[in-house]
Image (spheres, helix red, strand yellow):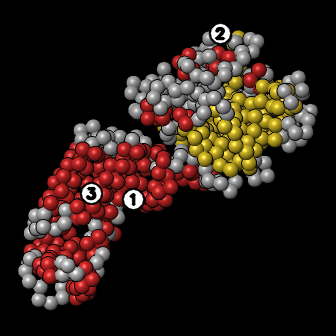
Amino acid sequence: MDRRFFFALLLTALVVVGTPFLFPSTRAKAPQTVAAGDSVRSPAGAQAPSGTPTVASPGAMAAAPAMRADTSVPAAVAPAPQVIDTTAVTAGGNVYHFVNVGASPVSVRVAGYADRRPGARDDEVQLVRADERLLRYRFVVGPGDTIALDTVPMRAEVVRGEGAGVREVRFTGNTARGGVAITYRFEPGDSTYLTTVAGRLDNAPAGSRLLVDLPRGLSSAEVDTLDDLRHLSFSYRIEDRDVESFAFAKLDTARAQIDTGAISWVAVRNKYFLAALLSVDEATPFRSVRMRGAKPVSKNVVLDAQATAAMPLDQGSFAFQLYAGPQKYERLNALGRDLVNVNPYGGWFAGMVQPFATIVMRVLLWLKQTTMLSYGWVLVIFGVLIRLAIWPLNQSAMRSSIRMQRLQPEMQAIQTKYARDPEKLREAMMRLYADHGMSPFSPVMGCLPMLIPMPVLFALYFVFQNTIEFRGVPFMWMPDLTLKDPFYITPIFMGLSMLLLSWIGMRGAPQTPQTKVMGYAMPAMMTVLFLNFPSGLNLYYAVQNVVALPQQWLLSRERAKAGIGAPVLGKAKA
């Protein structure tokens, strides 16, 4: 879709610019949360009581057929049967479910974000798939000596802070090497989605490392599930380098891809949500990331992939931060370290689109905070402001077009007179332009007002495709500004307003092939192109057209008064 959109609008731009030269003028309820610190004990493999998540052994999770079909990612070896305790905690805007075996979160429910799949029974987004864990830990303590914590049973303790809020969840246990402890410390606030993870391994030799396995994929909670799955990617940032992003479908299945350096964060994401591991400070970064793909389940859809981040132990200890939640622009931007670019706008064309998309996103957020209106009305205001901003330039360009039309008789006479003398023809044309306050670039400059809104249009398309602030936002009859208009009212209205704009612009103008293409073919092409585009994009474009109507009407009257085609007796006034 991204490439088709880009090339279609590129074609539009080429039509605008090139036509004068080709035609010269002649997308089960969520598990009930038990009280923080309460646990449910059941033999491994037995069904957990109602209201608690059923936690399969790591081996069972690795073999879940629904999401593992035909994948080349190796499955974990199933440990001996163990007692599994589940601890549920509500903190920072999330509902976490931890298991004692492995001391890891097995599910994360993101409060405030609805599961939007058709017929979905979950009230809110479940970030982690039922067959996965959010994190898995391993310690490398020597060549060929690795301790996998998802085979180690541990004891959980919930520590509360002031009031009833949970401040920490602590896990302690023993391994063949020695004692092990992992603590989750939750950031205060309702929408922080941030947790500090700290731990230690006793008797860890020098050079030991912590390996953190990210989930092999995230669950989808979108109307267009297929499009959401295509967004599954791993991203990371190494100091002094731009953000690296690798879609699951682009990862090699035959061999692992490894990158090293001072890694400030590693993340797995889909279209609107992510789980990211962030270094606590610059002195204790992750040092490597290893990724590997799996076979697709259908064209360009890969459900599984592996990513492991490695961090050196500091005298047996480690610490990092975990962000599990929405890709909210302001929240990610506040965390810094370029995390806001974990899901770059523009896909293949990020280098060109990203700057404009960032500016557009900031302006829309500012308008939302300033006006306190819904995003639908914000888009209306934004469309009006853009059109008013380019009004003077549009005015100048249209008047330049009127002057060019008035010059046609003299230009044709000069071309006829000096048809066999290019040098004198050039000199005569330059004098004619100078006498009327124009330049040889005036015909091309007349197209600029139509091309200047194009970068904003590109940026808005990708903003609607990737920005969670617009997810599920209704406006009037439209249930979601990021989805197509279910009744196609906005694209049809956009096309009709564009046609009316063109018709007014052609009144009194010479009926050349250029004006016919611009007047009739372009509105029809844009209507067909925009039918399945986000309704918010059509709303913006239609507003721009309506705001431009008065200016087009005034300039049409000005053209009629100018007497196009009449002899030019003196300099045209700007």
Q: The disc labelled 1 sits on which kind of residue?
A: Pro
Question: Which residue sits at x=59%, y=35%?
Answer: 251
Read off the residue under disc 3. 15
Determine which of the numbered discs, if any, sits on residue 46 in the image.
2
Q: Is 478 left or right of 29, judged from the image as shown?
A: left
Residue depth check, mark 3 versus mark 2: number of the one nearer the observer: 3
Q: Residues within 10 Å of mark 2 (few under 14, many from 20)?
A: few
Determine whether the residue tagged by mark 2 lies in a helix, strand or loop: loop
In the rendered view, tell whether residue 286 sits above or below residue 254.
Answer: below
Mark 1 Cα shell of 10 Å, populated few (<14), some (14-19), many (≥20): some
Q: Would residue 265 be found to the left or right of residue 301 on screen?
A: right
For marks 3 and 2, the one nearer the N-term is 3
Name the spot of residue 78 as percent of width and height, x first. Answer: 71, 15
The quadrant of the rendering that contains the N terminus is top left
Which residue: 70% across, 54% down?
239
Could you say which quadrant of the image residue 241 lies in?
bottom right
Q: Amino acid at mark 3?
A: Val
- Counting from the top left corner in percent of width and height, residue 253 is at 61, 29
Report which residue position mark 1 lands on: 455
Q: Nearer the viewer, mark 1 or mark 3?
A: 3
